[in-house]
Image (cartoon, grey):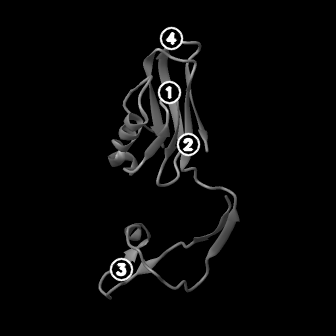
Amino acid sequence: MTVKERWLIERLEISPDGDRVFVNSDISGFPFLGEIIGDYIVLEGTSVAVTSWNVAISGTPTGGTYAITIDGYSTSDLAYNATTAAVASAINALSGVTGFSTVTATGTASAYVLAFPSGVTLSASHSLTGGTSPAVTVSAV
């Protein structure tokens, strides 16, 4: 996927009724249409935020736990054989910290895809036991 165009505007002010001015950080939740008057920078590139991640549990563990870290915030410990519903629930429980509440997980307990509503960084840590060199790996879809 290629990012076609992104506009960087240093300062944006909106005065919907003439008595209050919203500036950049204030308006993130307000949908609006507007006209850009003045200079702006248009960027093109191939950098796209990752919204879907593969998670694989390898080595056939028989016990232990692992955790998924999203943008620096970790889930509670997940059982080695946690269902996709349990994984999604643990991530969605972080909504007050990460801003996500609609993350989905599809697949099996040992190989699943996490889908986020916007781009994130993802990593995993584990203390899995049994099997042959158990591990948790994450990769962008």
Snapshot quadrant of residue 30: bottom left
Task: First in sequence, mark 3 or 2: give its number.
Answer: 3
Q: Are marks 2 and 1 in contact (CB under 8 Å)?
A: no
Task: First in sequence, mark 3 or 4: give its number.
Answer: 3
Task: First in sequence, mark 2 or 1: give its number.
Answer: 2
Residue drawn at x 62%, y 55% as measured from the top left: 48
Q: In this view, does 133 lie above or below 141?
A: above
**The one of 133 and 23 positioned closer to us in this rendering:** 133
Farthest residue to the front: give it: 108
Label 3 or label 2, whichever lies nearer to me, is: 2
Q: What x and y, as percent, mark residue 94?
A: 36, 42
Give the crowd class for mark 2: few <14, some 14-19, many >=20 residues within 10 Å.
Answer: many
Task: First in sequence, mark 2 or 4: give its number.
Answer: 2
Q: Mark 4 points at which residue?
A: 130
Q: What x and y, as percent, mark residue 39?
A: 61, 81
Task: Look at label 1 and name its amino acid.
Answer: Ser
Q: What x and y, as percent, mark residue 21?
A: 36, 79
Local secondary structure at mark 4: loop
Local secondary structure at mark 2: strand
Tell me the CA gap for discs 1 and 3.
45 Å
Tell me the CA gap for discs 3 and 2.
39 Å
Q: Name the residue under label 1.
A: 125
Q: Are marks 1 and 4 in contact (CB under 8 Å)?
A: no
Give the crowd class for mark 3: few <14, some 14-19, many >=20 residues within 10 Å.
Answer: few
Give the crowd class for mark 4: few <14, some 14-19, many >=20 residues within 10 Å.
Answer: few
Q: Name the residue under label 3.
A: 21
Q: Is residue 100 above or below residue 89?
A: below
- Left or right: 38 in relation to 21: right
Residue drawn at x 51%, y 17% as measured from the top left: 61
Tell me the CA gap for discs 2 and 4.
25 Å
Q: Are marks 3 and 2 in contact (CB under 8 Å)?
A: no
